[in-house]
Image: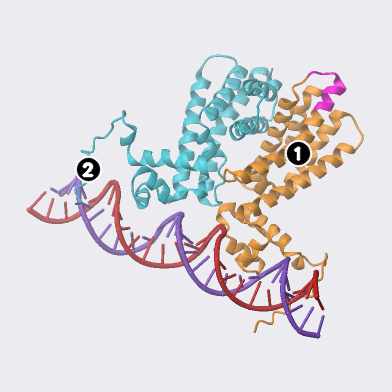
Chain colours: A cyan, B orange, C red, D purple
Amino acid sequence: MPLTKRAPTLRRTKSSRAHLPLRDQIRNTARDLFAREGYESVSMRRIGAQIGCSPMAIYRHYENKEELLLSICEETFSRMIQLLDETRKKPGTALEKLRRCMHTIVDFHLSHPNHYKVTFMTLMPPGPVAERKVAIAQRAMDRLRAGVRECAAEKGMDVDVEMAAQIIRVATHGLASALITTSRCYPWKDPERMKDELIATVTRQFE
Amino acid sequence: MPLTKRAPTLRRTKSSRAHLPLRDQIRNTARDLFAREGYESVSMRRIGAQIGCSPMAIYRHYENKEELLLSICEETFSRMIQLLDETRKKPGTALEKLRRCMHTIVDFHLSHPNHYKVTFMTLMPPGPVAERKVAIAQRAMDRLRAGVRECAAEKGMDVDVEMAAQIIRVATHGLASALITTSRCYPWKDPERMKDELIATVTRQFE
DNA sequence: ATTATATGTTTACAGTGTAAACATATAATG
DNA sequence: CATTATATGTTTACACTGTAAACATATAAT
């Protein structure tokens, strides 16, 4: 009976989602479930059942449930940072770049609401794992600070870079989380215009 | 042995925190624990143990854990709404009132971080209880909308009230949550100035 | 051919929310 | 006053949780 004849280890078959490496399958499934039902409400047993493996199989790839959550956050940040770096490379004034960065990030959040919900709306239990997440978040903030610094330099202004970057971060998250969490139950007048307006508002000091 | 001789029902002894009605004691204790360790990580058993009653005693006052959480949120909103109504009654221009309201709310959040964490940073499991919370939140938003409407009227401006109110709400929450969650692990330059600056920024259109 | 390693499964345990049944202290009613 | 009803607690029980421990096997290394 134990003749489960494992597939010949074919290292990568990009085409088929079902045969993704189990590690990725776990992370994708967990992200969907965490986003839809909340981190604490989703059991390792249910993640396993959804995938079709035993609950303990997950522990071969992630030390525990919290590390699985952190891994989802890490992937989100890594994608955000990549998008930011690409956007910042494109030509334009510093202000244009900064505004494009905000657009890029908000659009990324809106088109990946599950990434956003799990990464930014899940309260991690305080502890060393949560602090590792904070450290990673700083790497994204570095891009924002740089963008602000460039705006200030270009205009010869003397701005508090940290404060300006925080205001931008805070406004971006506020907008994204409002649009994502209430998109179904609340009648937004014009999300696209609201996005433009908010971005314009918090960067107006650099005009 | 069952001679637990209940205290003679003294209806109100304001002085002693320990003899608050059990219902209030439960809510206070639950709020502290939820804020410190996260809603899902706190068990009814631990709330009971902390208070000194059996876990099931809680269910005589709250239908279940989720209703207990909602009750904490309701208290927060009711206090916020009261503060807003008081602030809006004081004399001044519409813009001054709106800005004072924002100050009042941010200060309330900062001085009651546990109320904030539980009410605004705890993701409720989706369902009818969560929707009741959204409905209550709208009652607070009504005050913001009114403040914005008055600003617009006073200046004879034609503004999108809903959008302006949302931007203000979003910025306020972003600031509060940033200050509260990172206050220990992150070196804020000058929170007070950042607060002033953000409030000024998002209300500048009404100057 | 044998051993080691990677990756899975099954079993077991302490802790969870809460339904059900039971206990008693105060209030209401005869 | 005696009796019943109600409010408020406790104890017990059950189906679920995260995960440690032990076991199994399929591939890689020797």
Q: Residues within 10 Å of mark 1 (few under 14, many from 20)?
A: some
Query: Which mark, by number, is residue A6?
Result: 2
Q: What's under tag 1, amino acid-wise?
A: Ala
In reply to whether residue A100 is colored magenta, the answer given is no
Query: Which mark, by number, is residue B11?
Result: none
Q: What's under tag 2, amino acid-wise?
A: Arg
Q: Is residue B207 visible?
A: no
Q: Give x and y (percent) for residue B118.
A: 65, 49
- Tell me the element at label 2: loop
Q: Which residue bears the numbered disc 1?
A: B140
Q: Residues within 10 Å of mark 2 (few under 14, many from 20)?
A: few
Q: Is residue B184 visible?
A: yes
- Tell me the element at label 1: helix
Instruction: Assign the C terminus of chain B to one quadrant of the image.
Output: top right
- The quarter of the picture where residue B177 lies is top right
Instruction: Assign the N terminus of chain B to one quadrant of the image.
Output: bottom right
Q: Give x and y (percent) for residue B190.
A: 72, 39
Secondary structure mostly seen in magenta is: helix
Q: Give x and y (percent) for residue B8.
A: 79, 75
Residue nearer the viewer, A165 or B171: B171
Magenta-highlighted residues: B149-158
Say which chain tag 2 marks: A
Image check: B136 left or right of A144? right
